[in-house]
Image (tube, rainbow, N blue to C red):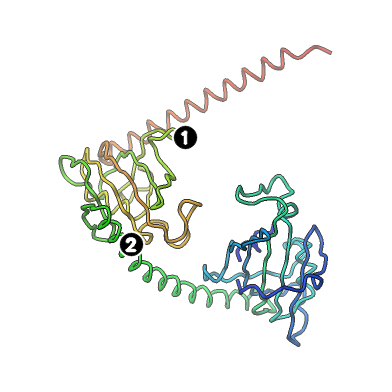
Amino acid sequence: MRQISFLLMAVILFASCKERDSFKKGDNGLSYKIISSTSEPVIKPGEIMQLEIIQYYQTGGKDSLLQDSRENFIPVLESLDSTTLPIEYYNIFKQTKKGDSIVIKMLTDSVFKDNSNPMPPFFKKGHILLTSIKIVDVFKDRETAEARRKELMAIAQKKQEEKVLEHEKTDDEALQKYFAEKNIKVQKSPKGMYVEIITPGTGNNIDTNVVVEVNYTGRNFAGKTFDSNTDPAFNHVEPFYVNMTSDPTLGNGVIAGWIDGLKMLNKGAKARFYIPSGLGYGARGVSAEITPFSNLIFDIEVKDILTKEQAKANAEKEMAKRREMEQSLNLQKQIQEELQKNSEPKK
């Protein structure tokens, strides 16, 4: 099956589809039905559709919501174009009108039969992906669609900001409850994250003129570790340099909660950061462990504090080491290829 990422962006609540025999057979293993109560004209090729999409994973028992574009507030615009839409979806959309809803069912076996599109570990063969799509609006040309997209993006940004503000209060309440239950003594940073000092350091506090070498381990509030530069399981046991300066060449950028927390530490300090979602990864999330609006915990150790000059020299040294390693690997590859070539029987 060809790519269907535009469907996975997902909007609109799933319209009831109890009548199994009303589904039609489509291409590439899907079945669908169109729910229509409008007298609008059929959408023409080249016109742009504003879509609302929601997607479920059905096991035959409990349905699981996978994605819902209403939650992202991001408009989904798709042109009725056979060169960009997978043909199985193009053949469905070309039958539809503004205001129509489409319900599409597809076995996971069919969705993920292509090895380049691996099945997620929590999916199983024989289950169903069900997608409901509402055609909210139709635009005759790209210029009109783009103007509407900008309007919708402005609305989406406002809604997102409102949601972030709502979560700020919820996050802080959850953190305060956690501290009280665990009897944890913390200090609040200027932006609203919390620092528990495990071992005090020495010297001046970190500022925005330095690069900080740290060891860290991050986990969510369910206790699941999602990253670490000290645990070999994450395959990067090496120094991590946090760039506190405005020079992007001197080190790694990090989430806002880290920057705020590190300013409360000094060399040798060991601390635990409690970061509300607004100072972490916010509404987007990044993984199964860091879902949207996740509060996070980081164990932090400040190994060293480097001046800009020291950080620049260190970055150049690290770059030279990487180049040397790449050259060594390339040389080994060439030697292996040459040995293999020489070991092949002569014809």
**Image height of 253 relative to 84, above or below:** above
At label 1, counting other C-alpha atoms closer than 10 Å, the crowd grade (few under 14, some 14-19, many 20 or more) is few
Can you say whether 338 is above or below 39 in the image?
A: above
Name the residue: 27% across, 61% down. Answer: 176
Instruction: Kindly state the secondary structure of the residue where label 1 is placed.
Output: loop
Q: From this viewpoint, which residue is outermost toward the bottom?
A: 39
Q: Quadrant of residue 148?
A: bottom right
Determine which residue is flagged by label 2: 174
Q: Does 55 sit left or right of 283 as displayed?
A: right
Q: Quadrant of residue 64?
A: bottom right
Within 10 Å of the Cα at label 2, are there few (<14), some (14-19), or many (20+) other Cα atoms? few
Q: Amino acid at mark 2?
A: Ala
Residue 173 spot, x, y in % from top left = 31, 65
Q: CA distance from mark 1 to mark 2?
A: 32 Å
Q: What is the quadrant of the C terminus in the image?
A: top right
Residue at point 77% right, 74% down?
19
Relative depth, front residue between 120 and 303:
120
Q: Is residue 10 left or right of residue 125?
A: left
Residue 7: image x %, image y %? 66, 63
- Whether residue 335 sits left or right of residue 343 in the image: it is left
Residue 268, percent from left and from top: 22, 38
Instruction: Pick the residue in front: 201 or 64.
Output: 64
The nearer-to-camera label among 1 and 2 is 2
What residue did someone put label 1 on?
A: 235
Count the marks: 2
Q: Which disc, if any, is residue 101?
A: none
Circle 1: residue type: Asn
Q: Residue furthest front?
A: 61
